[in-house]
Image (tube, helix red, strand yellow):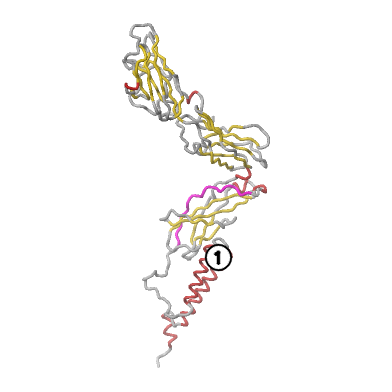
Amino acid sequence: MPAGGSGPAAQCARRPPRPLPSLWSPLLLCVLGVPRGGSGAHTAVISPQDPTLLIGSSLQATCSIHGDAPGATAEGLYWTLNGRRLPSELSHLLNTSTLALALANLNGSRQQSGDNLVCHARDGSILAGSCLYVGLPPEKPFNISCWSRNMKDLTCRWTPGAHGETFLHTNYSLKYKLRWYGQDNTCEEYHTVGPHSCHIPKDLALFTPYEIWVEATNRLGSARSDVLTLDVLDVVTTDPPPDVHVSRVGGLEDQLSVRWVSPPALKDFLFQAKYQIRYRVEDSVDWKVVDDVSNQTSCRLAGLKPGTVYFVQVRCNPFGIYGSKKAGIWSEWSHPTAASTPRSERPGPGGGVCEPRGGEPSSGPVRRELKQFLGWLKKHAYCSNLSFRLYDQWRAWMQKSHKTRNQDEGILPSGRRGAARGPAG
């Protein structure tokens, strides 16, 4: 059944005669013209029956009593709309058997199955009912997007229109066909990934484009989306990468190692993949994205804050599927995985850190070069094994250089400092 549904279940429902509730209920289906219960000596008819009007329109309706029994007159009749009695000044007697009603500037129907317009006898019993449909014609659906998880199926979703709400029951049908030949087909599995979506489970052809569009229909008209042309091989996606693990890199306080497993679909089909990583600190909602992960299944994040909890996610994009030159569609992000960087062993500002002596000619340039190197690494080489080897070598060289400067300045461990001074005298 097309999205939105259609058929008898969605139309006004015939119900046995009974008084309507005093307050409108959203679950109350519209009541068609029903005869008065009891002896059936006389009945009434509402005209027009089940009208459909645009928002802002006016309605002129009549309730006419038929029958020859004494007392079969329109005097004392009144109207209700969705269970609420309408003001008497909105109606007037046309003749002894007909009560007229005038409604202006109508709002959209409060229920898509139609509003209940009912004519009542003096004692409150129902004489006749009508469904009143007030709304808008459907707008042109847009923003159609489709994807396939196994190259045999296709799932599509769309946006119903710029404003969306029509106040009327609206059917949405997803249609598709081979581009150059073949007949129109209608998708049957609706609401699979949301209210405006449909799933085509099987029997799709590869290496040939499809045309896909959405048709919207209600009581006031119809609309058709633009046609989306696609090849199933160009819209393949996967599940997010499973088993994402984030861990520390030894004692390095500014790095975390990220590892994950390729989605199972990459093993079932001839897929290659590229990956993206994004991460954020625990108390932030802003993600930083690492784009240049390529097709590796591990990566080292550098330039992080010491002693900080990070949340990390990974996603996958299959490409090169059976020679396709287009990238696939990015998967959803994996579930966030948390890890923290080690706390810095160096005291922070004002913590008694021993700064180099004033006037030291090499300390400024070395620090500037290190800062430049780290900045370059953070910007260009998140996940290059070669770059991280260079970075590790740089850190080792800096530690050795720092130790050498300390020795040159006489800053030695206390045990060796006395030995270096020698005997007094």
Q: Which of 265 and 332 is in front in this view?
A: 332
298 sits to left or right of 310? right
The answer to which quarter of the image holds residue 389 is bottom right
Q: Is residue 357 left or right of residue 330?
A: left
Residue ID for mark 1: 388
Q: In which quarter of the image is residue 123?
A: top left
Residue at 65% over, 36% down: 178
* Image mark count: 1
Residue visible at 34% across and 24% down?
84
Q: What residue type is labelled 1?
A: Phe
Based on the picture, tell me whether residue 327 belongs to the magenta stretch. Answer: yes
Q: In which quarter of the image is the C terminus?
A: bottom left
- Percent coordinates x, y for residue 207 in the rendering: 67, 42
Residue displayed at 48% across by 73% down = 367
156 inside magenta stretch? no
Which is the main secondary structure of the residues drawn in magenta? loop
Over which residues does the magenta segment extend? Answer: 326-341
Locate residue 286, reporting x and y percent. 45, 54
- Residue found at the far bottom of this picture: 425
> Does residue 386 lie above or below 193 as drawn?
below
Q: Position of residue 239 (x, y in %)?
A: 55, 46
Say if 263 sits above or below 107 in the image: below
Q: In this view, does 396 lie to the left or right of 102?
A: right
Q: Which quadrant of the figure contains the N terminus?
A: top right
Give how far across and how far down residue 318 sits, in percent. 60, 49
Query: Dot 1: within a 10 Å radius of its alpha carbon, few (fewer than 14), some, or many (20 or more) residues?
Result: some
